[in-house]
Amino acid sequence: MVPLQDLEDYYFKAKLVLDYEWSAADKVAKKFGLNVISTQGTTRAVFKEPYKRDVIKLGFPTHNRGEYVFSKYVKGTKHSHLFAETREITPQGYFTRQEFVRKSLPQVICFLSDKNWYKFREILESCFSFVRLAVGNAGVTFDFHDENFKVSSDGNLKLVDYSDLACSMFCKDYNLKPETAVNRLKRVDIPPRDLNLTYSKDYGIRLAINDTTYHLPSLEDQSNETFL
């Protein structure tokens, strides 16, 4: 496994910090034998080390730190399975290591109409209203776009890009330590609701909140009501 610190040391030594993250991606990949799997984001490039279960992200420290501390915030709670775990971050914040979730959400599911997806997002995002209080920012945006979800081997949907949930903490105070940020977040308890988000090609997406289930069908499942 390539040490993240080696990546960050090279990043500074080669002065790649002067490049945009996606411009530096090929140079980093070639140096360390990584595969570039995505440079489509606005703030980050994503690498895969052959035969390893994690991905490596290169990006803005504010976004990487936001994702890392939020992952630590939800770890061990009933919400943790909705987020690909961000396991490690470098001291300068340019590189993170995150759980690899292989399968993208099929575009065919997006969806019988855009209106259905937006309504679905509204319900899901309402479950995370506590985040605004936790980060101390009423203007937090939720990055719950369909392209930010992937499907795990057991059918759970996981967010792989959720930096917007907590990056504002570091935009406000760039020198804020991740450990301090995690402690601040934990001052606000995460609601103890049961929250499950799953996908199957047969039934589409299901969101279960306690005893209520919402269904967003795939195109193959048009015999059912579209939504709600």
Image (cartoon, rainbow, N blue to C red):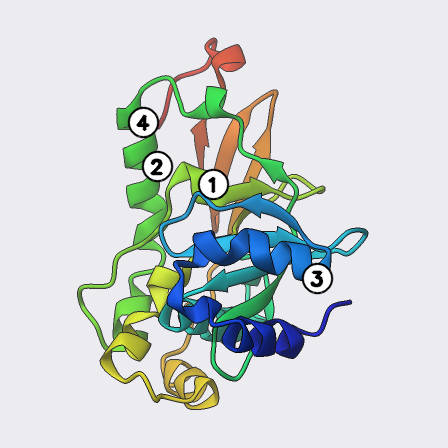
Instruction: Give the residue at the far top of this rendering.
Output: 223
Residue nearest the viewer, comparing 92 with 212: 92
Position of 59 relative to 26 (above/below): below
Name the quadrant of the C terminus: top left
Type of amino acid under label 1: Leu
The residue where tag 4 is placed is 116
Q: Residue at x 57, y 51 (%)?
A: 26
**Is residue 79 something that shows in the picture?**
no
Above/below status of 16 relative to 212: below
How far is disc 4 from disc 3 in space, using C-alphas? 43 Å
* Spot occupied by residue 30 in the image (x, y as percentages of width and height): 66, 55
Badge 2 marks a residue whose secondary structure is helix
Front-most of residues 135 and 187: 135
Circle nearer the N terminus (4, 1): 4
Q: Residue furthest front?
A: 14
* Label 1 to label 3: alpha-carbon separation: 40 Å
Please indicate, yes or no, whether residue 117 appears anywhere in the rendered image. yes
Q: Look at mark 1 in the image and give the residue it sits on.
A: 207
The answer to which image quadrant residue 104 occupies is: top right
| Residue kind at label 2, given as amino acid type | Phe
Across and down, in percent, residue 220 comes to 53, 11
Q: Nearer the viewer, mark 1 or mark 3?
A: 3
Horizontal and vertical percent position of residue 91: 52, 84
Sequence order check: which comes first, mark 3 or mark 2? 3
The one nearer the camera, 97 or 149, is 97
Mark 3 or mark 2: which is in front?
Answer: 3
- The N terminus: image quadrant: bottom right
The reply to whether dot 1 and dot 2 touch (C-beta < 8 Å) is yes
Q: What residue sits right under mark 2 in the picture?
A: 120
Residue located at (31% from left, 27% from top): 116
